[in-house]
Image: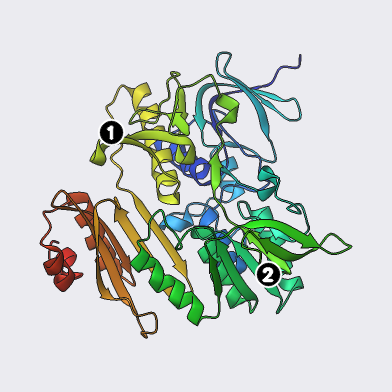
Amino acid sequence: MATGKHFKYIVLGGGVSGGYAAREFAKQGVQPGELAIISKEAVAPYERPALSKAYLFPQSPARLPGFHVCVGSGGERLLPEWYSEKGIELILSTEIVKADLASKTLTSSAGATFTYEILLIATGSSVIKLSDFGTQGADSNNILYLREVDDADKLYAAIQAKKGGKAVVVGGGYIGLELSAVLKMNNLDVTMVFPEPWCMPRLFTAEIAAFYESYYTNKGVKIVKGTVAVGFDADANGDVTAVKLKDGSVLEADIVVVGVGGRPLTGLFKGQVAEEKGGIKTDAFFETSVPGVYAVGDVATFPMKIYDDVRRVEHVDHSRKSAEQAVKAIKGKEAGSAVAEYDYLPYFYSRSFDLSWQFYGDNVGDAILFGDADPSSAKPKFGSYWVKDGKCVGVFLEGGSPDENGAIAKLARDQPPAASPAELKAAGLQFATSKI
């Protein structure tokens, strides 16, 4: 058998986590030839959130190399040349199909082997496809998904080809909301379809969702709730023409975009590492049950110190921070220096149309809405506190300034005693800003 390449460190995955890990390795000090980033994508790591937003804008859309990591968090932009300058091997368009942790060997679809001393698993998530469930007609042309830059290119091309056409968005989560907005901005006729009673149900309360649904409706987006796509019609060329819904109705469609969630890519490691809650179980330094093997981002189930719980988080903020933490831990262990435990505060955000919200903490307990949640307001600004056991544990804010967003983050971190619901509602954002 041909001998493969050997590296001291391999980062498996060239997404957000992979890019931020590379930067942290360079910062901590890595010798030329010690580190490889292996990615199945054809481009250097980039800030994935751009794909559902600026990449699809009708005017001056974002394009690579503009949004390589780490610009999304105000850091420097790591172009492919940066990796070569640092002596980091960027191994692109390479899909790893087998991982043997016992022999510390990775094998690619082309049969190449890579061995390592330390492995950082940053494989992220794969998109859930309707064809996975055998949905009739789900393989028709112009039924699109969004995960990688290639997917975004296909969607952008479809938007150009179907100008003024009908788009159906399947799913009422992040991708559904962000893509419905961007498709509307491109002057398509947009209908959103999702089975839940309101959008973003994992985070939004009914009251929060009502604002966004009304805002979208005012922008001309049609919303169909409480039903799912059960099949698709296509023409003689195999291009999608309609979406058939479970409630019996049919929606004409030139483009269908599906955003029904992702699955953490842990399959390569099944039976080789401890798993929990759908992810690879790690400690507060992102080391798995196998010494020298670390897992970060979407795939890691880690101790969330603030809630004394173990959780898995699918968000860009955690992808960045967990990657940095793991590399600090790897280098700290080598130097015999202590590294603080990961102490993560859950953070989610989204932007669409002229809207921008942030959420910090835990959305458990009683939700108390405050502020101006009138979708027809010129500048709507409202939020919600979550109160559990007499403490404020989570905060959501639409339309906040950077200072106000900082205040709600601090509140969620500190979990101060909460006033009565009526007092909280009356105090509104003051309750958070007065605590700074």
Residue at the front extreme, as displayed: 248
Tell me the SS state at disc 1: loop
Q: Position of residue 59 (x, y in %)?
A: 61, 77
Amino acid type shown at disc 2: Leu
Q: Is residue 77 visible?
A: yes
**Compared to 91, does 188 lie above or below?**
below
Judge whether 20 appears above or below 249 on screen: above
In the foreground, 356 or 50: 356
User: In 3D space, how far apart are the residues under numbered discs 1 and 2 (Cα atoms)?
Assistant: 51 Å
x 54%, y 62%: residue:
176
What residue sits 88% from the left and 62% below the top? 237
On screen, residue 241 above or below 96: below
Which residue lies under the disc numbered 1?
A: 341
Residue 61 visible (yes or no): no
Out of 287 and 127, give the one closest to the viewer.
Answer: 127
Q: Position of residue 250 (x, y in %)?
A: 69, 68
Would you name the residue on which mark 2 appears? 251
Q: Which mark is residue 324?
A: none
Question: What is the total number of numbered labels drawn onto the structure image?
Answer: 2
